[in-house]
Image: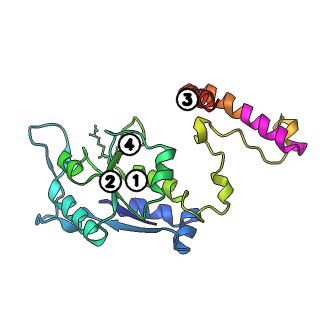
């Protein structure tokens, strides 16, 4: 699977792929990452890619021409690419989106800067728009990395153990149960004793209860949907 980051600051992103799971995924040719800089498409003699807002307003906005030329060139190479704009003005990216998008062959992630994009770029080019939460970043690079990372780990073979994808947080609207490793006693806190007794049905039952309690406490909104799901299954 290929990811194309459209960004003015590829060096902010590159380091993330220099080690660990995603580095190995690139080496194993499970994923491919490339960068396109809109500045390379600027027709302005100073290579400017931003401009003042028509009608006034604080801050600069990415002007449409350079970015549109960059996106046209990506589409020429791969007309089927799925173009995602990162913007706080969108629905929040969710785990189900990561799973769904991991089926795509090529995703283009468009990172905004300054006050964001000329709105017409979104009209013309976006297949989808995503926010990563109700807060404002200085640019779309971190948001694009969040999407790429969570989509890539759904791609077959990227995680060493595919079972890691089972029962993760957000499956069926539940947060994952607490995990423990040795030692059994750590700074006077112990692991639930049943966990060490090897009765896997009992452990699964305890983990489900712990996951429910954790979800109810941290994410009452999810808990309501989890309960609804259980009722629908009946
Ligand atoms: N003025 C804009 C914010 C611009 S932030 C507004 O008030 O809506 C600059 C860029 O950072 C955005 O174009 C977007 O690409 C990125 N960005 C900031 N916050 C984000 C978020 N929560 N999710 C996704 N992208 C975000």
Find out if the beta carbon at label 4 lies less than 8 Å from the nearest ligand 1 atom: yes
Q: In which quarter of the image is ligand 1?
A: top left
Q: Quadrant of the C terminus?
A: top right
Q: Does the magenta stretch include residue 207?
A: yes
* Nearest the eye: 131 or 56: 131
Q: Are marks 2 and 1 in contact (CB under 8 Å)?
A: yes
Spot occupied by residue 83 in the image (x, y as percentages of width and height): 32, 56
Spot occupied by residue 208 in the image (x, y as percentages of width and height): 72, 35
Find out if the beta carbon at label 2 lies less than 8 Å from the nearest ligand 1 atom: yes
Please tell me how crowded label 4 is: few (under 14), some (14-19), or many (20+) other residues with Cα within 10 Å.
Answer: many
Please tell me how crowded label 2 is: few (under 14), some (14-19), or many (20+) other residues with Cα within 10 Å.
Answer: many
Mark 2 or 3, which is nearer the eye? 3
The residue indicated by pointer 2 is: 111
The residue indicated by pointer 4 is: 131
The residue indicated by pointer 1 is: 144
Earlier in the chain: of badge 2 and badge 3, it is: 2
Task: Find numbered disc 4 in the image and state the secondary structure of the residue it sits on.
Answer: loop
Q: Distance between the residues labelled 4 and 1?
A: 10 Å
Q: Distance between the residues labelled 4 and 2?
A: 11 Å
Region of the chain picked out in magenta, as a range: 196-209
* Nearest the eye: 29 or 167: 167
Please tell me how crowded label 1 is: few (under 14), some (14-19), or many (20+) other residues with Cα within 10 Å.
Answer: many
């Amino acid at each position: 699977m290929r990811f194309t980051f459209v960004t003015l600051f590829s060096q902010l992103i590159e380091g993330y792929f220099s080690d660990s799971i995603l580095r190995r995924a690139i080496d194993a040719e499970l994923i491919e990452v490339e960068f396109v800089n809109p500045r390379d498409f600027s027709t302005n003699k100073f290579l400017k890619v931003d401009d003042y807002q028509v009608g006034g307003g604080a801050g600069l906005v990415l002007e449409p021409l350079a970015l549109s030329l960059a996106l046209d060139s990506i589409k020429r190479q791969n007309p089927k690419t799925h173009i995602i704009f990162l913007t706080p003005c969108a629905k929040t990216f969710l785990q189900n989106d990561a799973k769904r998008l991991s089926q795509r062959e090529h995703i283009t992630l468009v990172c905004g800067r300054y006050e964001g994009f000329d709105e017409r770029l979104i009209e013309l080019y976006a297949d989808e728009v995503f926010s990563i939460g109700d807060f404002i970043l200085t640019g779309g690079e971190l948001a694009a990395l969040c999407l790429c990372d969570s989509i890539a780990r759904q791609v077959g073979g990227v995680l060493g153990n595919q079972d890691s994808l089972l029962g993760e947080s957000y499956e069926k609207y539940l947060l994952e149960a607490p995990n423990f490793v040795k030692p059994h006693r750590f700074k006077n806190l112990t692991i639930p004793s049943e966990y060490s007794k090897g009765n896997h049905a009992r452990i699964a039952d305890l983990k489900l209860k712990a996951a429910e309690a954790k979800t109810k406490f941290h994410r009452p909104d999810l808990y309501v949907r989890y309960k609804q799901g259980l009722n629908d299954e009946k």
